[in-house]
Amino acid sequence: MRMYKILSVLLEYPEQELIDNLPEIRAIVDESTDIDAEEKGNLRKFLDHLVSMPLTELQASYVDTFDRIPEHSLHLTHHLFGEESDRDRGPALIDLGEMFKEYGVKTVTNELPDYLPLLLEFASNLDDNEATVFLSDVNKVLNTLTENLTKASSPYATPLSIIESRATLTRLAA
């Protein structure tokens, strides 16, 4: 599903390639039939934010948001187990890595398998219902992360809130 691919890209560390591709991303958002009007409006505001800042400021803001504040970590098992509990976190990371292998997904990144952009990349290869079920397993963590970013008035709360709203099994009943 394209929406998860877009969200994955938007939550990665911002590089010049992202800035260069923002017009294309905006066009995809505008033309997509699987993104509702409210999500489109929120994504447009977030894209406007990305366009409005110089790349170096975006990069500094990203680091300040996600790398310096543990409560904003995009590594989801951190929110479940914390950094100190490798004993609990390790098996969860191994399970995720094994699941990627079962689906034939080869990760070409240095990130751990619980890194949200990587999970969204994986979800983008699933059908809509599978992606919803997959992401619903981490809905509580997404809720916590969204709340933390909202409290901090971070613009990154916007894409997180979209992910959170899509990661619920009630969507399957609709």
Image: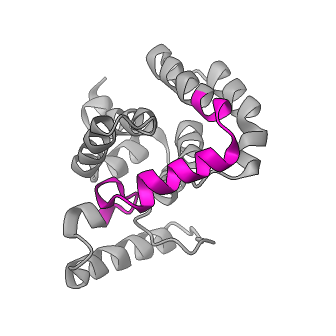
Residue drawn at (24%, 31%) of the image? 170
- Is residue 116 among what the camera can see? no
Q: Nearer the viewer, residue 16 or 79?
A: 16
Residue drawn at (51%, 59%) of the image? 118
Report which quarter residue 27 is drawn in: top right
Q: Nearer the viewer, residue 103 or 41?
A: 41
As drawn, is 174 to the left or to the right of 108? left
Residue drawn at (76%, 49%) of the image? 17
- Magenta-span inclusion, residue 63: yes
Q: Is residue 168 above or below residue 144?
A: above
Q: Is residue 62 above or below residue 102?
A: above
Q: Is residue 146 above or below residue 97?
A: above
- Is residue 142 among what the camera can see? yes
Residue furthest to the right:
20
Q: Nearer the viewer, residue 38 or 158?
A: 158
Q: Nearer the viewer, residue 155 or 77?
A: 155
Q: Locate the C terminus by quadrant.
A: top left
Q: Position of residue 34 (x, y in %)?
A: 53, 25
- Magenta-span inclusion, residue 126: no
Q: Position of residue 11 (x, y in %)?
A: 52, 48
As drawn, is 130 to the left or to the right of 143? right
Residue drawn at (61%, 45%) of the image? 57
Q: Position of residue 20 (x, y in %)?
A: 79, 41
Prevailing secondary structure class for the magenta stretch in the rendered image:
helix
- Which stretch appears magenta? 49-77
**Total label count?**
0
Residue furthest to the bottom:
87
Q: Position of residue 87 (x, y in %)?
A: 21, 85
Describe the colour scheme in one phrase: one colour
Q: Is residue 22 above or below residue 37?
A: below
Q: Locate the N terminus by quadrant.
A: top right
